[in-house]
Amino acid sequence: MTINELLSLMKIVKARIGALSSLRQEVSKKDIWAMEKEKIIEPQYDVKSVDKKITELETFLFKADAAIKQSNAITHVNIIVDVDKLLEPLS
């Protein structure tokens, strides 16, 4: 994959993350008013599944960005990071 193709894909993935984030915040529940006094919130999606997908996409973006930057890198930073552990979804 060329850098231009990867940059284009990253743009699409960022838009998808935005859509899923909105879904997680706004559409993941359904409000029902029972007897006009009690509000019942009914989940429409498994929030953990949505969070897992967002995390997978964010991990891809990190790895893609790092690969692009590495192609131009001159100086290395000595740090050991478990990216998958750092960005893992809520459990």
Image (cartoon, grey):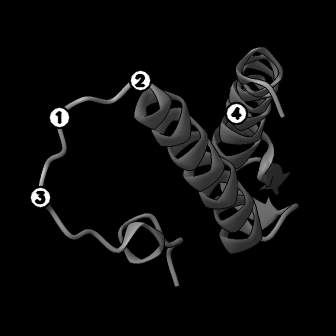
Is 83 in front, or is 66? 66
Q: Amino acid at mark 1?
A: Thr
Q: How many marks?
A: 4
Q: What whole-number distance in Å separates the C-alpha atoms at marks 2 and 3?
A: 17 Å
Image point 76% across, 23% down: which residue?
15
Helix, strand or loop at label 1? It is: loop
Contact check, label 3 and label 4, Cβ < 8 Å: no
Is 38 in front, or is 79? 79
Helix, strand or loop at label 3? It is: loop
Image point 68% across, 27% down: which residue?
14
Image point 80% across, 32% down: which residue?
16
Q: Amino acid at mark 2?
A: Asn
Closer to the chain start, of discs 3 and 4, is 4
Closer to the chain start, of discs 4 and 2, is 4
Is 8 in front, or is 38? 8
Closer to the chain start, of discs 1 and 4, is 4
Left or right of 83, for residue 41: right
Quadrant housing residue 35: bottom right
The residue identified by callout 1 is: 75
Helix, strand or loop at label 2? It is: loop
Which is closer to the viewer, label 2 or label 3? 2
Image point 46% across, 40% down: which residue?
66
Which is closer to the viewer, label 3 or label 4? 3
Q: Is residue 20 above or below residue 87?
A: above
The residue identified by callout 2 is: 72
Helix, strand or loop at label 4? It is: helix
Left or right of 25, for residue 9: right
Q: Amino acid at mark 4?
A: Ser
Which is closer to the viewer, label 3 or label 1? 1
Q: Which mark is residue 78?
A: 3
The residue identified by callout 4 is: 22
Which is closer to the viewer, label 4 or label 2? 2
